[in-house]
Image (cartoon, rainbow, N blue to C red):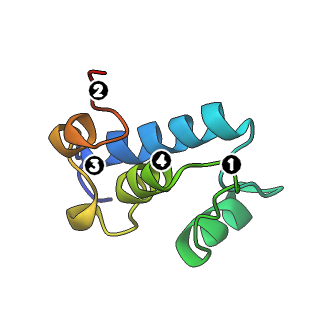
Amino acid sequence: RIPYRFEVDIWALGVMLYTVVAGYKPFDAPTPEQLCEKIMREPVLFPSWFSDELCDLIAGMMHRRASSRFTIQEVRMHSWTSVREE
């Protein structure tokens, strides 16, 4: 019943990024109710092969408090997504 806001899209992008890199979803449960419970109560656990930068990016994108979640500008400027010249 909360009006739609773009923070929801950032969360979804964080979930998709995690899933693409890890090969599995950050949260899983047999029912939608149990899935919501996990999302609200459990921390996001990162695989050991995720870099610190990637963990920081996804954690910022999946912050539970929407007001603290990364904006699209912050995602684009993050060190993991920024183009590096060598």
Q: Amino acid at mark 3?
A: Glu
Q: Is residue 36 left or right of residue 70?
A: right
Q: Earlier in the sequence, mark 4 or mark 3?
A: 3
Q: Earlier in the sequence, mark 1 or mark 4?
A: 1
Marks 3 and 1, Cα distance to the nearest angstrom? 27 Å
Tags 1 and 4 in contact by the CB under 8 Å rule? no
Of labels 2 and 1, the one closer to you: 2
Q: Is residue 48 left or right of residue 68?
A: right
Assign a secondary structure to mark 3: helix
Assign a secondary structure to mark 2: loop
Q: Which label is found at residue 49?
A: 1
Tags 2 and 4 in contact by the CB under 8 Å rule? no
Q: Earlier in the sequence, mark 2 or mark 4?
A: 4
Q: Residue at x 68, y 48 (%)?
A: 49
Of labels 2 and 3, the one closer to you: 2
Q: Earlier in the sequence, mark 2 or mark 3?
A: 3
| Relative image position of residue 47 (x, y in whole percent) | 70, 55
Residue beneath disc 4:
54
How packed mark 1 is, by other alpha carbons closer than 10 Å (few <14, some 14-19, many 20 or more), is few
| Relative image position of residue 8 (x, y in whole percent) | 34, 47
Marks 2 and 1, Cα distance to the nearest angstrom? 21 Å
Tags 3 and 1 in contact by the CB under 8 Å rule? no
Q: Residue at x 54, y 35 (%)?
A: 16
Assign a secondary structure to mark 4: helix
Tags 4 and 3 in contact by the CB under 8 Å rule? no
Figure quadrant of the N terminus: bottom left
How packed mark 4 is, by other alpha carbons closer than 10 Å (few <14, some 14-19, many 20 or more), is some
